[in-house]
Amino acid sequence: MFKKLREKTIESIGEFSLIDHIKSWLPRAKTPVVAGIGDDAAVFSISPSCYQLLTIDTIVEDIDFKKNQAAPEEIGRKALAINLSDIAAMGGVPKLAVVSLTLPKKTSIQFVKGFYRGMRGLANQFHVSIVGGDLSGGAKISSSVALLGESEKRHTVFRKGAKSGDWVGVTGRLGGSILGKHLNFTPRVREGAFLARQGVSSMIDISDGLWQDLGHLTTESGFSFMIEPSQIPVSSAALKEARGNRDKALLHALYDGEDFELLFTVPKKRFLSLKRAWRRRFSVPLTIIGKVVSGRQAEARAFSKRLGFQHFPPKNRRVPASPAGRRPLAD
Amino acid sequence: MFKKLREKTIESIGEFSLIDHIKSWLPRAKTPVVAGIGDDAAVFSISPSCYQLLTIDTIVEDIDFKKNQAAPEEIGRKALAINLSDIAAMGGVPKLAVVSLTLPKKTSIQFVKGFYRGMRGLANQFHVSIVGGDLSGGAKISSSVALLGESEKRHTVFRKGAKSGDWVGVTGRLGGSILGKHLNFTPRVREGAFLARQGVSSMIDISDGLWQDLGHLTTESGFSFMIEPSQIPVSSAALKEARGNRDKALLHALYDGEDFELLFTVPKKRFLSLKRAWRRRFSVPLTIIGKVVSGRQAEARAFSKRLGFQHFPPKNRRVPASPAGRRPLAD
């Protein structure tokens, strides 16, 4: 016997399926919205040449951070950084943030001061103004930040847009974020705006892990990917987590959440000039890891078919090593 | 011996004092912001004639609602409604919302569907589009909504702006919100926009209780208030909570949180035409409860001085009957 949907728990249907349900429960936007639920940020027109971008993201104690393993500064910084990463993935420039902070009554002023100090440092770095928010009481610490950004219409990039033959690229190195990067990563805001101006065809920030986020690009574009595992830039943290075993480190690079690097597709003919300009500007690695292939497959199956990674767990495998408990709806 | 600030808890210094500290910890906004932390929403210019308004507000299980005492529809509705009320208090029109929802793993799909059904109903009523959000895991249900709105510059109202001699008015009836209104109140969006066009000089939504929110207007304007307690419109719920005792019911009207009515000041000469136009348009009561008097007192002391309410508890009295655990930073 199958349970009726209404009797199921969110755990049993999975969060991505839940997001699809939520989409179906909500009516189409009244204000003309170019991208809504399902992209990294909501996108809507504010002038003939500009879009405005709006995103919200939440961090929760014991899911996204442990209070005894993270400094208050790191927690405040992360609450903003994950939103900056969403604006970066659209090629946008972040502008204004409002901050909701839920705190247990016994929280020290020192914690709150540290939280805002960490957030302020990152806000200053990216010229973001914190313009409001609210405070609530609660049993655990959590913080939601909503971030408003802007982008030039002709240089705005969506999850959808990849074409057959495009190359698949990634910034930075992947995996092992839980060893520290998930708290102190630099959101790829300048890199995202640069990639957008260079004509990348689709983009997403890697928050759920490379494998899952590749799937999100696929879903939107209706194409599939051929990935060359040997090209995936594995981080030293992934190697450390895998105790030097390169195969295991590759699994971390594929499945760990919260890398907050950018994953994008780019027309082959644009890549050479992009790469040259990138090298002049950034020290972060930029790596081509595969290409977009035609075929309306629902999932990126290239790994197992072409490269014999049959031991890879299925797409919805739970990765205990991943710090990612969050699942984006539109970020 | 006094404890150093950093060693104190947020409970010991109080939430309004904490908000003042947070203000001092954050730098001035880079983007020109007309109103920021300390008003109902952040206000910034997007065109020669229009402001954009941004607000965020959070509801937390067991603080703002009890799961076994509220339908999922009511919880979803409230998460949006409290933000609509903030935009209303500026005289603005709400436009787009993003929704962050934190849920325990065992939450039923039925709950989530009900939550969005309730939110959607209210969004439809006020022509608001839900354009994105995110889902998180957590031990308790909570939801943060960020809402973007617009206002005409010449018809935008702030907490600051009251002048000596202005009358003090309030929409609806006050007190006893915990008996149901805190879940099913109608945000005064149309009323707020109307009052703004009629030239009210300052406005706030009553979320912390009439007495405290009067204090917020005072703080911003540097004036004080003379209130006529017999004129305060006491709700039937407040009377019910007070078991028919009118004095006790008045205390509920003064101190209970989450009325979500509008409290405003208006130049005396504008009030007659405002009142006539109001009656043609709205069935909600509109009541003048006092006036603004000069004198740069930090708090609204008129009650005790003029009217002998010496038995009133101090401003920071905790009201166990109040469902309000939230404290606004800029909403």
Image: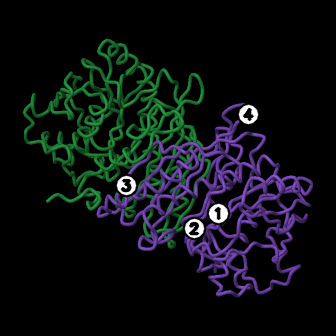
Chain colours: A purple, B green
Closer to the chain start, of discs 3 and 2, is 3
Q: Which mark lies nearer to you, 3 or 1? A: 1
> The numbered mark 3 sits on a residue in which chain?
A
Q: CA distance from mark 3 to mark 2?
A: 25 Å
Residue to which mark 4 is pinned: A49
Q: What is the C-alpha distance between the residues marked 3 and 1?
A: 28 Å
The residue that label 2 is drawn on is: A182
Q: Nearer the viewer, mark 4 or mark 3?
A: 4
What is the three-letter code of the residue carrying label 4?
Answer: Ser
Q: Secondary structure at mark 3?
A: strand
Task: Estimate the x, y position of residue A191 in percent, counting from the top left.
Answer: 71, 54
Q: Are marks 4 and 2 in contact (CB under 8 Å)?
A: no
The 10 Å Cα crowd at callout 1, few under 14, some 14 to 19, many 20 or more, is: many
- Tell me the amino acid under the disc marked 1: Phe
Instruction: Identify which residue is drawn at 68% across, 64% down.
Output: A206
B117, above or below B283, in the image: below
Front: mark 3 or 2: 2
- Looking at the image, which residue is at 30% across and 30% down? B170
- Residue type indicated by callout 3: Ser
Q: Is residue A120 above or below residue A206?
A: above
Q: CA distance from mark 1 to mark 4?
A: 28 Å
